[in-house]
Amino acid sequence: MNSSDVLLRVEGLRKYFPIKKGLFKRVVGHVKAVDGVDFFVRKGETVGLVGESGCGKTTTGRCVIRLIEPTAGKIWFRDNGRMIDLVSLSQGQMKVVRRRIQMIFQDPYSSLDPRMSVRDIVAEPLFIHKIGSHREHTQRVEELMDHVGLNASHMSRYPHEFSGGQRQRIGVARALALNPSLIVCDEPVSALDVSVQAQVINLLSDLQEEFDLTYLFVAHDLSVVEHISDRVMVMYLGKVVETAVADRIYTAPKHPYTEALLQAIPMADPRAQKSYYPLEGSVPDPSNPPPGCNFHTRCSYAQAICSQEEPELVELPDMPDHFVACHRVEELELRGISARKKWGTQPDEQKN
């Protein structure tokens, strides 16, 4: 990995939410939403962050931009050619850096102020950072509306006058207002219809090429992430369990949880033979995670060591940029999505 290409590097990120009980609200425990996450994002690429609801992916994205204050860890961001630790910055210093880091939120309905016009919503970042005059703000909004496929003459309208897809385009325009280099996309299409999802994904891809953007794309739908991501990170119960180039994740997963997520993707062909075997059990309590590997309580491949020792996230020797946290990574031959049609029976030999 060429360190000069890295725009964002996260080391040992943790976010624990306190559990308070009793009259005096004493802290009796912590919900470990993010528990020791390490990853990097290169300039100009899109890294997908996926996992089930509650795995900590949204919290990770919000910690990166410090909308949520991390409990521990370092967040290195390249600003003007040098790496700075965002965690060490004061709120005033962080406000300056936020010109380079923006966020697109999940819900296009609650993320836009219903009392503000589209012009004021998109221009608000410029107003907060005291960039340009009122006239320049209006000109910038017109440019951004055109870039995201909206009619600039509608900037005087209010959010309730737009559809969900149009509202999300307004959110995208707002994120672009300050010419950021990194945008954290927090499930930007999960609240939209499937046809509109494709339009927004294509828009984000076009904008990335046009403005040389870098995305951290948070999503729970692997079929969405597949079309936009260069690399994919898979999270489970606050930890990254696998990360690799997107094609490799989908065709040759190395972690059992990744395999399970891939098998859950619906197949478009109703005649195809289905061989999905749902995970047994439920996600463990993040305030009291199981010992060893967090996934061993639901893993069909688990052995004794899995419940005793926590696996490290290590790079595979013959696969650069492919990191896996699994004790049996060298033994298992897991099923990718491209070969799913071939399976009609469960591989008993590997399930034992």
Image (cartoon, grey):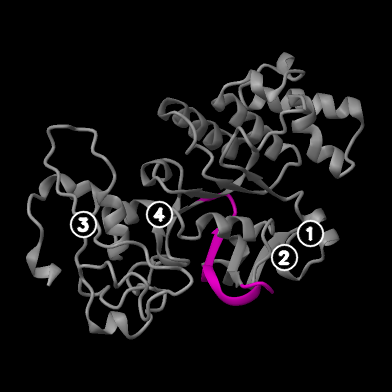
Between the C-alphas of marks 1 and 4, the distance is 30 Å
CB atoms of marks 2 and 1 within 8 Å: yes
Q: Name the residue under label 1.
A: 94
Q: Is residue 332 left or right of residue 246?
A: left
Within 10 Å of disc 1 (Cα), the crowding (few <14, some 14-19, many 20+) is some
* Sequence-first disc among 4 and 3: 4
Q: In this view, does 221 lie to the left or right of 127?
A: left
* Sequence-first disc among 4 and 2: 4
The amino acid at mark 4 is Glu
The amino acid at mark 2 is Leu
Q: Is residue 111 left or right of residue 263?
A: right
Question: Could you tell me residue 343's position as x and y percent?
Answer: 11, 50
Within 10 Å of disc 2 (Cα), the crowding (few <14, some 14-19, many 20+) is many
| Region in magenta | 22-46
Disc 4, SS: loop
Q: Name the residue under label 4.
A: 52
Question: Could you tell me residue 92's position as x and y percent?
Answer: 85, 59
* Sequence-first disc among 2 and 1: 2
Quadrant for the C terminus in the image = bottom left
Direction front: furthest residue: 23
